[in-house]
Image (cartoon, rainbow, N blue to C red):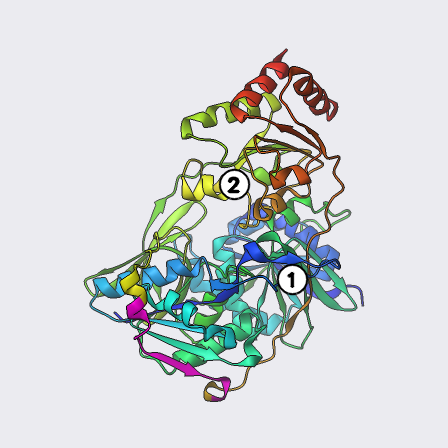
Amino acid sequence: MNTIACYKVVPDAQDIGVNSDGTLNFDKARMILGEYDLMAIEAAVSLAEATDGKAMLLTVGDESLNDSKLIKAALSRGAAELYSVIDPALTSADAFQTASVLAAALDKIDYDLVICGEGSADLYAQQVGTLLGSLAGLPVLNSVGKLEEKEGTLVVERVLENEIEVLEAVLPAVVSVTTDINLPRIPQMRDILAAGKKPHTIWSLADLGDLPASPVVTVSTKAPESVERKHIVFESDAQENIDELVSQIRALG
Amino acid sequence: MTTLNKVWIIGESLESYSALAAVGRRLGGTVEAVWIGGAAEAQNLTDCGADAVLVIAKPEDALLEDYLGAFIDAIGTEEPDAVLCATSKRMRLMAARMAATVGTRVMNDSTRIWVEDGSLFAEHMVFGGAAFSVEKAQMIPHVPAVALLAESLLVNEPAGEGVPAGVALSELPSDPKASGFKLVERKPRTVEAVNLTAARRVVSVGRGIQNKEDLAIIEDLAAALEAEVGCTRPIAEGQDWMSRERYIGVSGVMLKPDLFVTIGVSGQVQHMVGAAGAKTIIAINKDKNAPVFKQVDYGIVGDLYEVVPKIIETMKA
């Protein structure tokens, strides 16, 4: 079974600062692979390995994708090749635009199953996989916690709030996997070295078609205003401090 | 224009509809509840606060996903201006499928939603809680806005007054369309019933706790405070010491308790944002430089293994 895992390159949340006007500052944020996309990559690689297929990677974004460290970080996780759609117009592509570009890219690749993560590590809108499947006209499912081939059929387990559905999929299909479907492998030095030699195909939007406008626009992105707090911190756990704390708790009613 | 013309509401459970209808009434002139399931169940929705109940008949055992096509077709014929969905895994799939079909994206995990100058606006958390984005759905003919409403929005929505009751029930076409997935079996999933969003008091534990067994003292404290227990992500996902239902963080759980007590929590934004709406925040941490102390009303610098039993004892005295 030939699989494709989609991933997104995102700014590392730990390094995002806040400007005085509440907008976010990305100056110090290095770009990394989306944390939840690592499970999609692992799922695509392990399913391909188990079925003598090929695992591939697909990503869309701007020039920041074309960083050799990021490419190696992705390809060192077991996939055979990488397809990137790189275009300046994709810098702030939203979920709909991203899914549209992914769908156009899928037309150029031969595959049985596309796997997306639960959500991107930056916007976490948890919809690109489903939008992609729908736009590509393929069967699509979210919240998949297990993928297995049984006698030529793909069997998936879908983890819902109060039940697990076991389903058989008609291929090709698109699924989004949960964050606990697997524990992503940690690439070894030889994997990282080998990653540099794997094929990498780069397309621009000109190769795929126009970027559609999105009917939903982001008006603002700002850090929440911090709530005024009392900031009374006792530097020891002396009984009088505990008494004071408890009396404050009791005063809350 | 301060409201939309027609708003549809849809949820996976009957219980979600009165809050959905209350939000719908705030946003739209006409609110129609759509139910995919049995007509008998839909009878329970005639007093939910919507102006009408529309039913897409689905046999009990059939996959909801096989009826999404009928729902999406109905959007095309009935033309609601917005579709508001209660959040669940199924509804996430459903919302994104309908959004893609009409050519838009979902306004996901909306913690606030309102109409301004005839457009629908919604706010949701991004960058792991570091920020909130405001999204605007430009009202384009035949492109309804699709929004998933966060649990915290629904539980805090005031009930509407003078809402219609005993409204008519009508059926929409309900031809199944194969989703491409065939149900083999359903397995029950035992999850802990915990509703942090509704809790008035929450005690949250982080990595300062050293062993799973030690959670007992946290539970004792929660009992003394009559609080629910939550945790940071590593406790639920890395260590598996507590169920995922209890973790407060990027999952989007937004709490507005009267009291939020953190124990051994460093104070990362991803966790603390979930409790930013708490009236009073108390932290216990042995590191006096922990970021958490910048975000509290009261703090005690000390070893949780000593502080927590002392608090419990003092509470009981």
Whether residue A151 sits left or right of residue A76 in the image: it is left
Mark seen at residue A170: none
Kind of element beneath mark 1: strand
The amino acid type found where label 1 is placed reads Asn
Q: Residues within 10 Å of mark 1 (few under 14, many from 20)?
A: few
What residue is disc 1 on?
Answer: A25
Q: Chain of mark 1?
A: A
**x and y percent of residue B97 in the render?**
50, 67
Locate the N terminus of chain A by quadrant.
bottom left
Give the residue drawn at x 69%, y 73%. Answer: B139
Give the residue drawn at x 41%, y 26%. Answer: B213
Give the residue drawn at x 67%, y 76%. Answer: B140
**x and y percent of residue B296 in the render?**
68, 36
Whether residue A205 sits left or right of residue A247 in the image: it is left
Residue B128 visible in the current orientation: yes
The amino acid type found where label 2 is placed reads Thr
**How much space separates mark 2 and mark 1, taking CA atoms?**
25 Å
The total of numbered circles placed on residues is: 2
Q: Is residue A205 magenta?
A: yes
What residue is disc 2 on?
Answer: B232
Locate the C terminus of chain A by quadrant.
top right
**x and y percent of residue B44 in the render?**
58, 47
Q: Residue furthest top?
A: B317
Residue B53 visible in the current orientation: no
Q: Which residues are magenta?
A: A193-206
Please name which of the two marks, 2 or 1, marks the residue nearer to the observer: 1
The relative height of residue B243 versus residue B214 in the rendered view (above or below) is: below
Q: Residues within 10 Å of mark 2 (few under 14, many from 20)?
A: many
Whether residue B103 sits left or right of residue A129 in the image: it is right
Front one among A33 and B88: A33
Which corner quadrant of the image does residue B29 belong to?
A: bottom right
Which corner quadrant of the image does residue B210 belong to?
A: top left
